[in-house]
Amino acid sequence: VLAGPGVVAAQDLRVTLERGAVVAADASRVEVRWTVTNAGSRTAQLLRWQTPLEGLRSNMFTVRCNGVEVAYLGPLVKRSRPSAADYVALPAGRPRSATLDLAAAYAFRGPTCTIEWRGRLMDVVDGAAPPASGPPRAWRRVELQAETVTLDLTADGAGATVGCSAQQTTI
């Protein structure tokens, strides 16, 4: 995928999902660490919406326990147009991370659970400054895949890596 003016190439973005420092066997706390890295040569602006960078405000993960998808119990936020404050700068070569306790929003039922990030960055643009507020414009969505984290909630579970890929669309 080639990037034109104002567009960040999808292949320049990497997302990882890892088991967090705290995972309780009773599923009262299930931490994951999500990291996005800009492997490109220029700063990108990333809309935080529906990413861990804004916390748990949408159903952004697929959680399966014993092969069955579990319910998302957290908030679902509706919004108007984004402002500059809704974007975060992602400098070239630099990561941004967030650690979330998924037990606060998902109904974990062990013993074996998998966690996948749904893989959508809603808007990613090139530039040191976020897009100016004003009339609507086409969003530059980027679809990414991160590792699947597998947890054994009967013991001290560990994560497993399954690879990643990227796809970019403009809507």
Image: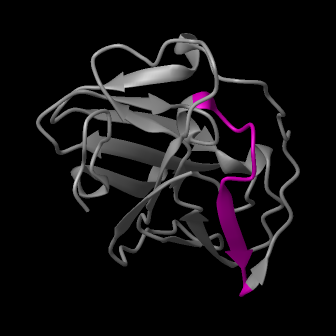
Q: Quadrant of residue 94?
A: top left
Q: Quadrant of residue 61?
A: bottom right
Residue 56 vs residue 50, the one in the foreground: 50
Q: Which quadrant, please, contains the N terminus? A: bottom left
Residue 146, how many percent across, how many down?
Answer: 42, 63
Residue 66 vs residue 144, the one in the foreground: 144
Residue 20, how many percent across, how many down?
Answer: 48, 49
Q: Which residues are magenta?
A: 54-67
93 sits to left or right of 166: left
Q: Residue at x 45, y 47 (%)?
A: 34
169 sits to left or right of 106: left
- Colour setup of the view: one colour
Residue 12, how many percent across, how many down?
Answer: 23, 50
Is residue 28 placed above or below 69 in the rendered structure?
A: above
Q: Please identify the residue farthest to the left as the structure is shown.
A: 41
Residue 151, how many percent across, how many down?
Answer: 56, 71
Q: Residue at x 29, y 50 (%)?
A: 13
Residue 114 vs residue 40, the one in the foreground: 40
Q: Residue at x 49, y 12 (%)?
A: 132
Verify whether residue 150 appears in magenta.
Answer: no
